[in-house]
């Protein structure tokens, strides 16, 4: 059973009760009574610890519960022989919204549930440490939210966002028991993670309903997709701002985000719930899985996921999931995963591991582009291999999909292997065409896919006896799409290959199974 997040569910609401956006009462470094809500703190004040073994022995719960039961500041509340004052002072809007008029569970109840569950401090310290310094000068007018696609991202688009943005984005899978960023080699069905992203406000106005001068509402959303190079079936994650841990509401409200500043947003990633949702989404998509069921596909090879985080103001529509972060600041993507080789397993030799992924159209309006230019909307999959000598890379494609979508004249650095060799490689599809990658830089040309998806699998073959423990290299697949670049003065356009997505598999070898909680570098 999930429990409320201290940082996202509770602390963020404590901040607006303590008037942090206006820098008053508990909103300064010292804070009234030694309690600061500028940062999560260490749960203590000069008067003593804020939390005990139970809600009743926890001063913070006691002073809020006193207010909830009808007392007002400064009615004394004695906990463990120490006198505290009923809080909050007055009736701040946040208290009314999250306690007085809120449906069950209310804020005080959620706080009690968290205490009873063990008081886990899940502050996402790595993600917070990755927040850039405030944007210096040149801010845009109004409230301009964005999701960070690289370290130091200042929200300028088009700007310096790299073509492999899925590697550099400030999106982190987080261990809810420690708050530390992790890079799990597998996603166990019983596991739960947080998906945390760094967001910013490039505008010159403070945003959020609870800013010092109330600003425009800011909302974020988190989505996970089947491992892909561009687009694939997706499910939305519940927001960690929900007081009800069973709520599936995916809208995370950013209560305040001041001009030029950064913060983090968070979502609950329950692996079993996500897998169930993806099985349904894949089934609804009708994608050719080469004889596999959607359940087979989702549970294969630990099922790496692609994560996307979106942000908007209430007056804006959501950016589409297929929008590229290079041009759209309100979306970012994370598509980086470890590819674990266990050197203690030596049979068979050579050995091959497969990782399934999907390809889809990212730029939706290009689905009909061929009507005015046959080059528009065509895709290129660029495969870059940097592995130890002797390792080989293969691609598997369902037979029907290969016949429909592939043209051998648009393959560079890949060769179709014979049927006998293909069977020995044990591809994940029951009926598959297998391509051997013969160059470190290979290329596949694909037509416009429209609303359909192409299922593929990438295989890495190796001899365990010839490898040493440690990082071995990486395999990167980048997808680009032919898109128009308009010259309004000349009333003409040219066609350019626009980066729209991809993924990176970081390959390392270890003696024994990789620790799923290994910190994310």
Image (cartoon, grey):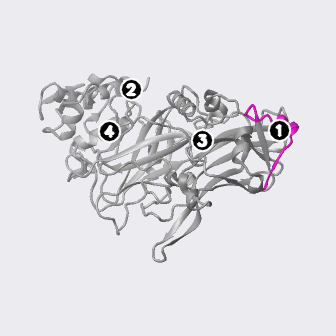
Assign a secondary structure to mark 1.
Answer: helix
Q: Position of residue 453 (x, y in %)?
A: 60, 42
Q: Is residue 180 visible?
A: no
- Disc 3 marks which residue? 227
User: Which mark is on residue 246?
Assistant: 2
Q: Residue at x 42, y 62 (%)?
A: 154
Q: Nearer the viewer's eye, disc 4 or disc 1?
A: 1
- Disc 1 marks which residue? 422
Q: Is residue 144 left or right of residue 132?
A: left
Label 4 vs label 1: CA separation?
A: 55 Å
Label 4 or label 2, whichever comes before in sequence order: 4
Label 2 or label 3, whichever comes before in sequence order: 3
Assign a secondary structure to mark 4.
Answer: helix
Q: Position of residue 205 (x, y in %)?
A: 27, 59
Q: Residue at x 14, y 38 (%)?
A: 91
- Disc 4 marks which residue? 11
Label 4 vs label 2: CA separation?
A: 19 Å
Which quarter of the picture shows residue 95?
A: top left
């Amino acid at each position: 059973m999930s429990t409320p997040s201290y940082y996202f569910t509770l602390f963020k609401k404590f901040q607006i009760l303590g008037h942090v956006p206006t820098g008053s009462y508990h909103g300064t470094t010292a804070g009234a009574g030694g309690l600061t809500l500028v940062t999560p703190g260490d749960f203590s004040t000069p008067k003593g610890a804020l939390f005990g073994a139970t809600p009743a022995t926890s001063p913070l719960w006691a002073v809020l519960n006193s207010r909830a039961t009808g007392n007002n500041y400064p009615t004394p509340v004695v906990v463990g022989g120490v006198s505290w004052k009923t809080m909050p002072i007055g009736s701040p809007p946040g208290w009314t919204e999250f306690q007085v008029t809120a449906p069950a569970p209310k804020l005080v109840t959620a706080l009690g549930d968290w205490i009873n569950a063990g008081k886990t401090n899940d502050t996402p310290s790595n993600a917070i440490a990755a927040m850039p310094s405030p944007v210096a000068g040149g801010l845009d007018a109004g409230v301009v939210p964005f999701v960070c696609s690289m370290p130091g991202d200042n929200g300028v688009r088009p700007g310096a966002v790299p073509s492999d943005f899925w590697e550099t984005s400030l999106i982190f899978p987080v261990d809810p028991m420690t708050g530390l960023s992790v890079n799990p080699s597998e996603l166990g069905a019983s596991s739960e993670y947080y998906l945390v992203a760094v967001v910013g406000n490039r505008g010159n106005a403070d945003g959020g309903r609870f800013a010092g001068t109330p600003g425009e509402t800011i909302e974020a959303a988190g989505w996970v997709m089947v491992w892909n190079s561009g687009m694939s079936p997706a499910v939305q994650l519940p927001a960690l701002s929900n007081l009800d841990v069973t709520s599936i509401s995916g809208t995370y409200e950013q209560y305040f985000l001041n001009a030029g500043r950064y913060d983090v947003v968070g979502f609950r990633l329950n692996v079993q719930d996500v897998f169930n949702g993806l099985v349904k989404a894949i089934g609804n998509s009708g994608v050719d899985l080469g004889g596999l069921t959607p359940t087979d596909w989702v549970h294969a090879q630990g099922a790496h996921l692609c994560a996307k985080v979106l942000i908007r103001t209430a007056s804006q529509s959501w950016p589409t999931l297929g929008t590229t972060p290079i041009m759209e600041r309100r979306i970012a993507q994370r598509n980086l995963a470890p590819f674990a080789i266990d050197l203690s397993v030596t049979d068979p030799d050579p050995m091959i591991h497969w990782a399934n992924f999907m390809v889809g159209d990212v730029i939706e309006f290009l689905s009909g582009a061929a009507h005015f230019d046959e080059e528009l909307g065509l895709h290129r999959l660029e495969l870059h291999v940097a592995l130890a000598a002797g390792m080989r890379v293969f691609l598997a494609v369902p037979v029907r999909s290969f016949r429909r979508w592939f043209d051998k004249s648009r393959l560079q650095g890949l060769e179709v292997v014979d049927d006998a060799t293909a069977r020995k490689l044990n591809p994940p599809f029951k009926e598959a065409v297998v391509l051997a990658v013969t160059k470190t830089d290979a290329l596949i040309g694909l037509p416009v896919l429209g609303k359909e998806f192409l299922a593929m699998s990438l295989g890495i073959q190796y001899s365990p006896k010839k490898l040493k423990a440690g990082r071995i290299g990486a395999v990167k697949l980048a997808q680009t799409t032919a898109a128009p670049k308009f010259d309004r003065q000349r009333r003409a356009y040219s066609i350019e290959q626009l980066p729209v997505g991809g993924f990176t598999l970081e390959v390392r070898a270890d003696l024994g199974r990789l620790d799923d909680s290994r910190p994310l570098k």
